[in-house]
Amino acid sequence: MSQTVNKQILVGHIGAAPTAADLPSGSRVLNLSVATNRTWKDKESGDKEQRTDWHNVSIFGKSAENAEQILKSGDYVYIEGETIPSSYEKDGQKHYRTDIHCSDWKILSSRSDSEEDNGNQ
């Protein structure tokens, strides 16, 4: 039998402030958006191009409770998890969404660390 892998690793900055909610099961979920950047050189013009991609991340359970106390907008984070595609209908139109269900996270630097560094320069 062949094995399959569904693993996503992100290193980026948290966008808006994370939002927490209680699930019907009584477990906690923390939702956040993480920005990653891609940079490349345009083949025709030679100009440097950049694109920011936004990723929807959900952290569950005890990990969500811990993250809720620590993670803030602007923090630089490592996120590891599983990609979960979904679809929904709104106003008669089908929309698609991809979320990352986080299995591990680490804060690499906080916004307050950056502010302190800038103050010391």
Image: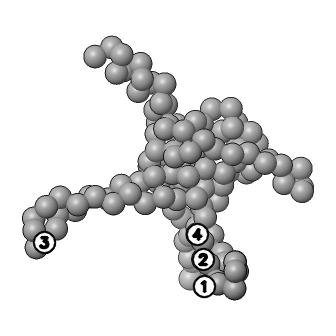
Determine contact: label 2, label 4, CB under 8 Å. Answer: yes
Image quadrant where one finds the N terminus:
bottom right
Tell whether 34 sits left or right of 28: left
Is disc 4 surrounded by few (<14), some (14 to 19) or many (20+) residues within 10 Å?
few
User: Which label sits on residue 98?
Assistant: 4
Q: Earlier in the sequence, mark 1 or mark 2?
A: 1
Query: Residue at 41% across / 27% down in the picture?
Result: 114
The amino acid sitting under disc 4 is Thr
Q: What residue does disc 3 label?
A: 43
Q: Earlier in the sequence, mark 3 or mark 2?
A: 3
Q: Earlier in the sequence, mark 4 or mark 3?
A: 3
Query: Residue at 69% across / 85% down in the picture?
Result: 92
The amino acid sitting under disc 1 is Met
Query: Residue at 54% across / 39% down in the picture?
Result: 73
User: Which label sits on residue 96?
Assistant: 2
Q: Nearer the viewer, mark 3 or mark 1?
A: 3
Q: What residue does disc 1 label?
A: 1
The amino acid sitting under disc 2 is Tyr
Query: Helix, strand, or loop for circle 3?
Result: loop
Query: Residue at 75% across / 50% down in the picture?
Result: 29
Query: Helix, strand, or loop for circle 1?
Result: loop
Q: CA distance from mark 3 to mark 1?
A: 43 Å
| Picture coordinates of residue 47, whole percent (x, y) | 13, 61
36 and 62: which one is in front? 36
Determine contact: label 3, label 1, CB under 8 Å. Answer: no
Residue 109's place in the image compared with 105, above or below, is above
| Picture coordinates of residue 108, whole percent (x, y) | 46, 36
